Amino acid sequence: MKLNKTASSTIALSAAALLVLSGCASTDSGATGMIQELGDNEAGISILAWPGYVEDGTNDPAVDWTSSFEEATGCEVTVKTYGTSDEAVNLMKTGEYDVVAASGDATQRLIAGEEVMPINTSLVANYEGIFDFLKNQSHNTVAGVNYGIPHGYGANLLLYNKDVFPTAPDSWSVVWDGASANAGKVTAYDSPIYIADAAVYLMATKPELGIENPYALDETQLAAAVELLKAQRANVGEYWSDYLLEIQAFTTGDSVVGTTWQVIANVLLGEGVNVDAVLPKEGSTGWSDTWMISSKTDAPNCAYRWLDHIASPEINAAATAYFGEAPSSMAACDFRDDCDAYHAGDADYAKQLWYWTTPIAECLDGRTDVQCTDYTRWTAAWQEVKG
């Protein structure tokens, strides 16, 4: 897969698609086909997002940042939620959604599959205030072309029961080499992207493997990660993708240690469960979600205005706080009182995170003498791990 070639193809497709939109938005006549100015708003947009990203007061009257957008723009919002990045990619292929909030293990697939268009960030006023370390990353930018606007971000942390671990663990070893000490009560994230978590640990403990990027694994490196995951499998009581399942498992004591999100730890602590979460010394994987616009959209004006709305400090603060992640700008912290807990804006903390990124055959670590394993290969490997 040649990303430069893919980017050119995607841009060309976007140009062709946008030119038939009856002048709803203005594009240039150059090679990029990128929207240069916005026109009148359409009737509405359909948004695909993680649960909790697009709230209109239906679930909780006090939680609503969608109604204000509809009132200000006249763009009626419909939303569908999804549970995994694989589901999001498949749904975007239908062409039924104008906007998607995608994690890094979906964004590259959407770009390569020509499902999303390049974004003119100058048309998103709130883009300027977004943290620099979230911009121009491999999961949202290809060959210098932006394909989305950063939203929230966070780390995949180590969650542990303090009764079982009276001294806080500082290493992922408790779920890898030392997992047998809590056999049957270890939990792990249920997704092929979890292979990268094994790779992060191997980067620190087996440097002879030469892993420099956990999403850039050749066959030898992938085999080492799979071996580690299979060893862990014997000690895993439950794999989770629904965060409510992990909350239940730690509440009942069926799980005592494993990978987690800060929001899960917050819920458990709020319910009086004796747990805590840490970022281990090896670093971790994490997520940095991106708002992207479908290349097939017939509502580019409403779509761009949603991107700007959700990036505005007060709205971004509300959305990211509700989900349980760091906001995309320091200005958003003026509307939150928990930014320190999420290390918002802490570039040194962010450097310890490897944001979810779709693995591709062209090695993301820059190697050209080998071919790396792509997401299809990872999916097959994950099935092998779980049996």
Image (cartoon, rainbow, N blue to C red):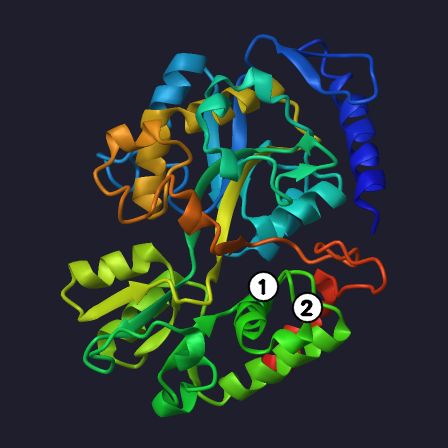
Point 46% across, 67% down: residue = 282
Point 62% across, 50% down: residue = 106
Q: Element at badge 2?
A: helix
Q: Position of residue 202 (x, y in %)?
A: 57, 74
Q: Earlier in the sequence, mark 2 or mark 1?
A: 1
The amino acid type found where label 1 is placed reads: Ile
Point 70% across, 9% down: residue = 23
State whether residue 185 is above or below residue 345: below
Q: Quadrant of residue 375?
A: bottom right
Q: Is residue 368 left or right of residue 133?
A: right
Residue 387 can be seen, yes or no = no
Point 20% across, 79% down: residue = 166
The residue that label 2 is drawn on is: 378
Q: Is residue 112 left or right of residue 302?
A: right
State whether residue 339 is above or below residue 332: below
Q: Element at badge 1?
A: helix
Tell me whether circle 2 and circle 1 mark residues in contact (CB < 8 Å). yes
